[in-house]
Amino acid sequence: MKKCFLVALLFCFQFSFSQNTDYLKSVLKQLKIKESQINQELFTQKVLPYDKGKSVFVIAKYASEVSVDYFVADAYILVVDNATGKIINKFIEPNAWTSDAVMLSSITIDTGLYILNKTTRAFGIRVDYTGSSRPNPYSESDLSLYITDKNSLKPVLKNYQISQSNGEWDTNCAGEFEDNNSTIDIDKVMTNNFYNIIVKTKTVNTKNIPTNDDCIAKETIKRKTSKLIFNGKEYK
């Protein structure tokens, strides 16, 4: 009996998952976009944990000719009904993302506790970039926050740099690196009916020094706290 229940549960999960995944074609049809016009490797979707009847879809539609190391993409941020595949809310930003020497490597949906007031919860989109130079390594992650505004989506935080790493070295040992990583907390204080956002940033500077047959790393750590304030339209 227990085995039958587990099999049935697994079947239901697989059916639900496959049904949700199949909605990409339906969503593209509603948008009048061909599959060949999007970057399928960057496509991502996630069920909203606080509203499980809906999912967020993120689509990167090519806005330029595509080459090995370059493209520009329009951003399609969508909220989709999990039962029907119908688009409920959408936000479209032309020429939102560029991938070149600094490559757009991934897009993820962040459903953290971005509770901005008693009736408004945002979800985040994180866009990651990676540099191609080994002597000058570089990476960056940008965060945008979106809220539902009637039948559309509204960005309230756009491309905020949440992390960045860069450096210059001889590819063996000697060199200097800087890593910046930020975390976000929601303040208890409001401005224009939205809670302020507290940003805590940790910066690690590393200097690598070759010594005999060893490579010694010396670190300096700094911490900073700042705030983002809602100005009536977006956080700045």
Image: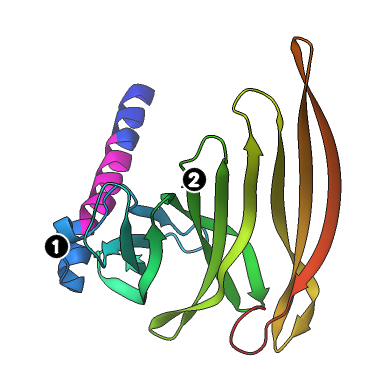
Does residue 14 appear to the left or right of 132 in the view shown? left
Q: Position of residue 2 (x, y in %)?
A: 38, 24
Main SS, magenta region, reads helix
Circle on res. 131:
2
- Mark positioned earlier in the residue sequence (1 or 2): 1
Q: Which residue is mark 1?
A: 34
Circle on res. 4:
none
Q: Which residue type carries mark 1?
A: Lys
Viewer-side residue, 103 vs 1: 103
Position above or below: 13 against 22: above
Viewer-side residue, 177 vs 142: 177
Does residue 131 appear to the left or right of 205 in the view shown? left
Name the element at disc 1: loop
User: Which residue is at 18% across, 61% downward?
Assistant: 37
Q: Position of residue 218 (x, y in %)?
A: 83, 31
User: Which residue is at 61% across, 61% downward?
Assistant: 161
Q: Which residue type carries mark 2?
A: Gly
- Mark 2 Cα shell of 10 Å, populated few (<14), some (14-19), many (≥20): some
Viewer-side residue, 151 vs 72: 72
Q: Which residues are magenta?
A: 11-24
Position above or below: 100 against 15: below
Q: Position of residue 7 (x, y in %)?
A: 30, 29
